[in-house]
């Protein structure tokens, strides 16, 4: 039996950039192959070659699909052959219903008239297949990101996809949405659909794949059975250097209590009858990394926003910095007091996409470069250059728009912004979501460097390995309540998970 797909020796250049330098992959029917590699290693480019987005003739090498040469001119060529691609950026039309999106451009007709009854019936079957229990008439804009992702898959299935490409599908998803998606991929595989899967979440990759192919800088490093690889193996192949562990823990001194948070209550922004944070109190020590764990919706972000003075809903509570009560009615107050927060959703709350890398970095510290209302450009540029270097922000220069950087480098630039105001407490909400392993490693290293200088860090994270790998102590929240306050010694994912789910107070 020949493989379903072979891509042999693919070379693809963008001007002087060799994005792919002789990459080969092979995939059997009913198999899941994961592509791993840091940002910019060429994963998406390889998939765009496969799908005809970069047509035959714009690359070297050959593609063999179902035993025949495949020379796609465009994406509909490959769609017709049962190759479906789901990009990280969703492509559905938000104003239209699920049904309209599913059949856009391939409406089902009877006697030349659109057959809505048939489409409705087909749509229901497709939604059932992807375990989405909403009406096909629902507007796509009213669905969550995870649900939209499932509609995209349903759409690919409607075209009878035999090979499904998922390019970083779970980056924006919650844990439960991720689980649904992973289960679906497994089910599809069992029904004979092959899958090429791209994700930065290596434990996910390991669980779901039959084979893993690692690419570095457009060069194939190797393909192996997933069962024979540990996540450390994958990382080592990806970054090309031995990485003893994912988390560069370093000894650091933990001092006296610098922050006390007392009896914080917060209510839902839209409905002040629904509590989001319930009587939460905790302390933070100098030089400490405090992890905050819990399921999505446990109230972690809300608690941090209250402290940082940016929570939009009704809230109350007391905050003491070095024994002195502080009022944080706004983020400005918090920053002045020495508390900085890097928000969860970089794209929505963090970066100003049209502004340059440098301007994004200096945004919070403009006061430092301004006298009598005039910005001292040289001073600003020097500060920016220093920070960019210290945080290893990889950018050709700091004048280009921040949106052209990779996620990891954007995150470093945002971190730089808040470090410029020299806070004593830094709150990081999901600091490494959706960024590659190399950049993650650098951010962790930076965190340890910072706490060694006496800064304290609160890190909200949904990734348990990260919480365990980085924190000195872990708060676990469940339905707005701090259920656990655990020193990170002999802690395990199970202990934290039990605490995040259970009703009993652990500590
Ligand atoms: P990945 O998906 O692994 O993050 P990509 O395939 O997107 O990586 O990118 C691989 C390399 O090709 C990067 O150096 C990227 O900057 C470059 N590249 C990708 N698309 C284009 C394009 N349309 N024009 C120029 N360069 C590109
Ligand atoms: Mg990509």
Image (cartoon, rainbow, N blue to C red):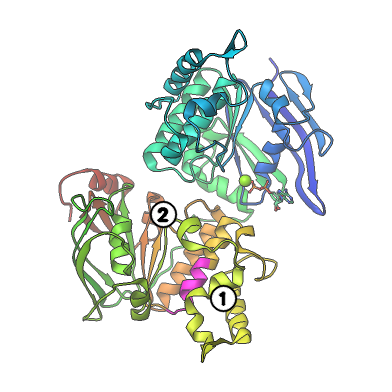
- CA neighbours of label 1 inside 10 A, class few (<14), some (14 to 19), many (20+): many
Range shown magenta: 414-422
**Relative depth, front residue between 148 and 88:** 148
Give the number of callouts: 2
Mark 2 or 1, which is nearer the eye? 1
Point out which mark residue 387 bears: 1
Locate residue 493 relative to residue 144 in the image: left or right.
Answer: left
Position in image of residue 16 (x %, y %): 82, 54
Q: Would you say residue 262 sits in the magenta stretch?
A: no
Task: Decide which of tag 2 and tag 1 comes sooner along the chain.
Answer: 1
Q: Name the residue under label 2.
A: 466
Location of residue 470 with respect to 45 vertically, above or below: below
Quadrant housing the C terminus: bottom left
Position in image of residue 68 (x %, y %): 77, 19
Identify the residue at horizontal 32%, vertical 74% (top origin): 254
Point out which mark residue 147 bears: none
């Amino acid at each position: 039996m020949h493989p379903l797909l072979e891509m042999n020796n693919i070379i693809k250049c963008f001007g002087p950039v060799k994005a792919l330098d002789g990459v080969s992959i092979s995939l059997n029917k009913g198999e899941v192959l994961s592509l791993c590699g840091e940002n910019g290693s060429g994963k998406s480019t390889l998939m765009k070659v496969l799908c005809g987005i970069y047509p035959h003739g714009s690359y070297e090498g050959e593609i063999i699909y179902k035993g025949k040469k495949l020379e796609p001119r465009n994406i509909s060529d490959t769609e017709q052959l049962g190759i479906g691609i789901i990009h990280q950026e969703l492509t559905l039309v938000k104003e239209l219903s699920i049904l309209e999106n599913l059949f856009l451009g391939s409406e089902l007709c009877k006697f030349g008239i659109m057959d809505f009854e048939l489409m409705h019936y087909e749509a229901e079957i497709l939604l059932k297949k992807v375990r989405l229990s909403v009406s096909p008439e629902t507007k796509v804009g009213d669905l969550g990101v995870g649900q939209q992702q499932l509609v995209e898959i349903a759409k690919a299935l409607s075209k009878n996809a035999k090979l499904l490409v998922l390019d970083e599908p779970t980056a924006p998803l919650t844990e439960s949405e991720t689980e649904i998606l992973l289960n679906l991929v497994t089910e599809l595989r069992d029904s004979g659909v092959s899958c090429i899967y791209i994700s930065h979440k290596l434990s996910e990759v390991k669980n779901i794949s039959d084979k893993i192919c690692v690419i570095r800088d457009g060069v194939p490093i190797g393909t192996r059975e997933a069962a024979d690889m540990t996540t450390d193996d994958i990382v080592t192949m990806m970054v090309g250097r031995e990485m003893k562990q994912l988390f560069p823990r370093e000894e650091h001194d933990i001092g006296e209590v610098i922050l006390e948070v007392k009896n914080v209550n917060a209510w839902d922004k839209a409905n002040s009858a629904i509590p989001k944070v319930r009587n939460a109190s905790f302390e933070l020590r100098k030089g400490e990394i405090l992890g905050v764990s819990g399921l999505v919706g446990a109230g972690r972000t809300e608690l941090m926003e209250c402290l940082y003075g940016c929570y939009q809903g009704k809230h109350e509570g007391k905050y003491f910095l070095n024994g002195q009560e502080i009022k944080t009615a706004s983020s400005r107050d918090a920053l002045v007091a020495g508390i900085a927060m890097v928000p969860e959703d970089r794209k929505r709350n963090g970066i100003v996409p049209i502004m340059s890398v440098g301007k994004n970095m200096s945004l919070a510290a403009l006061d430092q470069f301004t006298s009598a209302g005039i910005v001292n450009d040289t001073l600003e540029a020097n500060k920016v250059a220093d920070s960019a270097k210290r945080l290893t922000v990889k950018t050709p220069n700091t004048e280009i728009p921040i949106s052209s950087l990779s996620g990891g480098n954007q995150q470093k630039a945002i971190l730089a912004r808040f470090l410029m105001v020299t806070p004593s407490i830094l709150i990081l909400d999901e600091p490494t979501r959706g960024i590659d392993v190399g950049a993650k490693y650098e951010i962790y290293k930076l965190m340890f460097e910072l706490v060694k200088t006496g800064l304290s860090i609160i890190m909200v994270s949904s990734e348990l390995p990260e919480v365990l790998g980085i924190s000195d102590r872990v708060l676990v929240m469940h339905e707005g309540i701090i259920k656990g306050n655990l020193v990170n010694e002999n802690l395990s994912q199970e202990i934290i998970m039990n605490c995040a789910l259970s009703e009993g107070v652990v500590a």
